[in-house]
Image (tube, grey):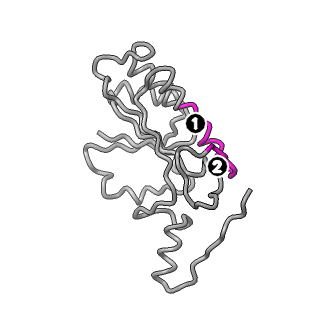
Amino acid sequence: MIVNSDLLKFAEDLKNLKEIANNSNYTFLKEGICNKELVQSLFNKYNFSEVIHFAAKPYVDYLIKNYWMESPNIFKKNFKNSIFHHISTDEVYGILGDEWLFTEHIPYAPNRRYSPSKSSLDFMVRSYFHMYGLNLITANFSNNYVPKQHDKKLMSTIIRKAILGENIPIRVPEKC
């Protein structure tokens, strides 16, 4: 069962979900995860064992700790293999250096407006791993392309401009 909770703000569009909208194993809620009571009720109803978290605002992690775990480092019987997938961004690392490569060993340098909230959440989720033993995977994705991606995203713009034979906008970032 997949439960998708989203406020549908900037880049989200329900039209992108039309292929799965009527699937019996899929539920969409136009609701944010900052509604603690809603998230708790969803955990109670669906008995989640995995969460994929794309949001920049927390609350889910706290509920997972209480729902999946008896106490620090002790999972409830049916949740020993539960995993919290935290999807972050490469923007937490700041601007690319001369190597044009980010690794997880680069210090955080959240220089853009969106980055501090993701950086803070990365640290908070990481603390749940260290303090409580939460099974955690954090992914810091870069500019990836997926079908139906918002037109303002870099890869969508480059692909669209290339197909139309238009000039592709290139901007080399200034170093901080």
Q: Quadrant of the N terminus?
A: top left
Q: CA distance from mark 2 to mark 1?
A: 12 Å
Indicate the amino acid at tag 2: Tyr
Q: Residue furthest front?
A: 99
Q: Nearer the viewer, residue 112 or 149?
A: 112
Whether 45 is drawn above or below 74: the answer is: below
> Circle 2: is it few (<14), some (14-19), or many (20+) Cα within 10 Å?
few
Q: Secondary structure at mark 1?
A: helix
Q: Which residues are magenta?
A: 107-125
> Which quadrant of the figure contains the C terminus?
bottom right
Q: Residue furthest left?
A: 24
- Identified by mark 1, the residue type is Leu
User: 61 or 133: which is nearer to us?
Assistant: 133
Q: Is 122 contained in the magenta span?
A: yes
The disc label shown at residue 121, or none: 1
Is label 2 in contact with label 1 (beta carbons under 8 Å)?
no
Q: Nearer the viewer, residue 46 or 130?
A: 130
Q: Which residue is mark 2?
A: 114
Residue at x 61%, y 49% (from the top left corner): 93
Taking 4 as reference, is 99 left or right?
right
Question: Residue shown at 50%/26% (left/top)?
Answer: 128
Can you give x and y, in whole percent of width and height, for residue 69 in the image?
40, 18
